Image (tube, helix red, strand yellow):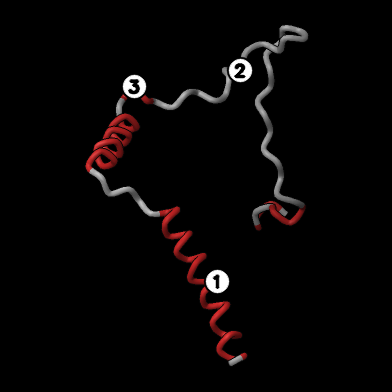
Amino acid sequence: MKVLLFLLVPILAVSAYAAWVWARNREPSSVESGVDAFRREMTALSPDAAPVQRRPERGPDPADGAPRPAPRRPSAGPGSRPPGDR
């Protein structure tokens, strides 16, 4: 009897958790949800939904008015030179 209880409790716990995860993550299947999904995709593809520019344009440095220098690329380390540059 203890062996069945030892196996039955974890099986029930895993089954309950799997059902809860499935119910939480399932996709809605109504007609309205399909129309809403299509509308979201069309809005994302429209030219009006162009991504916003995230980097500001390089202008003068506000401290002294001089133009900002371009950022330098970080080096990959001492052993990263091409074979012909030694």
Q: Amino acid at mark 1?
A: Ala
Question: Looking at the image, which residue is at 44% across and 64% down?
Answer: 19
Percent of width and height locating residue 5:
58, 85
Image quadrant in which you'd find residue 32: top left
Q: Looking at the picture, tell me which residue is in the foreground, 17 or 52.
A: 17
Q: Looking at the picture, tell me which residue is in the foreground, 54 or 78.
A: 54
Which label's residue is closer to the chain start, 3 or 1? 1
Q: Which mark is residue 13?
A: 1
Per the image, the residue denoted by label 3 is 48
Q: Which mark is residue 58?
A: 2
Percent of width and height locating residue 68:
68, 18
Quarter placement of the N terminus: bottom right
- The residue mark sitting in front, 2 or 1, is 1
Quarter placement of the C terminus: bottom right
- Mark 3: secondary structure: helix
Percent of width and height locating residue 53:
50, 23
Percent of width and height locating residue 51:
43, 27
Question: Looking at the image, which residue is at 47% across and 60% down?
Answer: 20
